[in-house]
Image: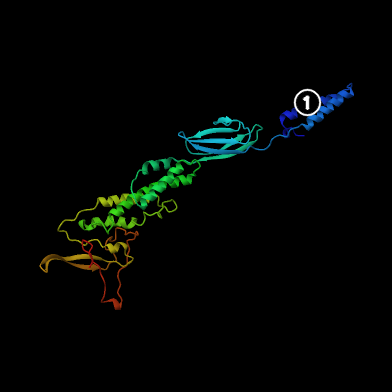
Amino acid sequence: MNPDDYTQESWNKLQGDLDVAEMFYELDGFKQEEIDLVVDRLEQNFNALVPADKTAPTVDLSYEVTDEGVKVTLTANEAIQSIDGWTKVSDTQYQRVYAGAVDETITVYDLAGNKAEVQLTLADKTALKEAIENFGNLEGSGKVYDNYVKVLNDGKALLEDPEATQVKVDNAARNIETCYYKVLVAALNTKYDPETFDYSKYTTDSIIPVQNMYGITHNRTNNNYQENEAQGNIGQMKGWYEEYLKAEAGLTLADQDEKYIGLNTDALSSSSKKQGNFNVIKQEIVNVDGTYKIQLTMEFINDGLHPIYGSELPNANGSTKFSKFSFGESDAKKARVHTYDSKMGGG
C-alpha cells in the first residue's frame, strides 16, 4: 500500500493500529478478547481509509475595470492555498489589481497540494488612451465624420473591455488616428474641389501641388481606406494632410496682367496615357468686335509630359510617365488638342 494514495489523517489511524497489531503478534500472554479487539479496530480503520485528492482545482478568472486598473478575481472550485501578491477574499477566491499590461501564468495549489495553472493576459492600452485623448476632439458632419465617430466610440468601448486582445487595441488606436486625419483631409478636398473652388485667382505653378493632393486623396477618405502593417501605409493619411497644408500655404495670387495657361481639369482624371504640353510663343493685344483681348499663340509639344504635372510632380496615381501621341496615315490631318484659359474654359 502507498501512503500517498490516502489522506494523512486516515493513514495515520491505520498505521497506529498496525503498530499495535505487530506488538500483539510478536508477544505472548494476550487474551483472545484483546486480540479480537485489535483485529476489529484494524479492520475498521482499514475500511475507513480515505483516498487522497489528486484532482487539480478548477480555476476561473473574472475582470472589472476600476480607477486603479483592472481588478482580477480568481475563483476556484475548492479551497486553495494563498497566492503571492493576491488578496484573500475567501478560501476559494483571491483578488489583485493590475495597472498595466500583463502576460503571465498564475499557479494555484489546493490544500492537498494539487496544482492548477491559468493564463492571465491583459492588453497594454496606453496607445489607445493617447489616441482617444489626442484625436478624439473633432466636430463635424457628413459620412467621413460619422465614420470617425463610430471608430472613436469603438475604441472607447475597447478601453473599458478588460478582455480586449492586444491586436484589437492596437488596431483601434491606429484607426482613430487615421480617421481623424481623414476628416481633416476630406475638409480640404471639399474646399479645393475643382468644381467649386475658383482657381483662376492663382498662378498655375501654385495650383499644381494643391490639385495633386486633391487627386491623390479625394477617393481615399472613404470607409474602404485602411492603414496597416501588411500594406505598409501606416501614417499615410497624416502624411497626406501635412503635404496638403504645405501645398495650401504655397497658393499664390496671380497678378492682374499675368498671362498663363489655366488648370486643365480634364487632365486630372483623364484615362489617356498619351500627353503633351503647351508653350506660349507669342502674345499680342487684338481688337475683337470693338473689345481688346489678349491673343496667345501656342505650340503643342508632343513630348509625352503631363500638361498639369509635367515630369517632376507625380499625378494622382503616382505616375510621371506618359506616352507621346502617334499618328497613322489616316490620322495625319486630324488631331484634337484641348486648351484651357485661366477660368477653366475649354477650346
Q: Is residue 336 above or below residue 64?
A: below
Q: Is residue 131 left or right of residue 203?
A: right
Q: Nearer the viewer, residue 149 or 334?
A: 149
Residue 124 horizontal/vertical position (percent): 46, 40
Q: Is residue 325 visible?
A: yes
Q: Residue furthest top?
A: 29
Q: Kindly state the secondary structure of the residue where label 1 is placed.
A: helix
Res. 198 image quadrant: bottom left
Residue 293 horizontal/vertical position (percent): 13, 65
Q: Nearer the viewer, residue 343 or 336?
A: 343
Q: Is residue 43 left or right of residue 214?
A: right
Amino acid on which the number 1 mark rests in the picture: Gly
Q: Residue furthest bottom?
A: 330
Which residue is found at the position 25% from the left and 68% from the top?
338
Q: Residue furthest front?
A: 141
Q: Which residue is mark 1?
A: 16
Residue 92 horizontal/vertical position (percent): 60, 33
Q: Residue furthest left?
A: 290
Which residue is found at the position 43% from the left and 46% from the top?
154
Query: Mark 1, residues whose alpha carbon is within 10 Å: few (<14), some, or many (≥20)?
Result: few
Q: Is residue 320 left or right of residue 17?
A: left
Q: Quadrant of the N terminus?
A: top right
Q: Quadrant of the C terminus?
A: bottom left
Q: Is residue 178 visible?
A: no
Residue 244 horizontal/vertical position (percent): 30, 52
**Number of marks in the rendered image:** 1
Res. 135 image quadrant: top left
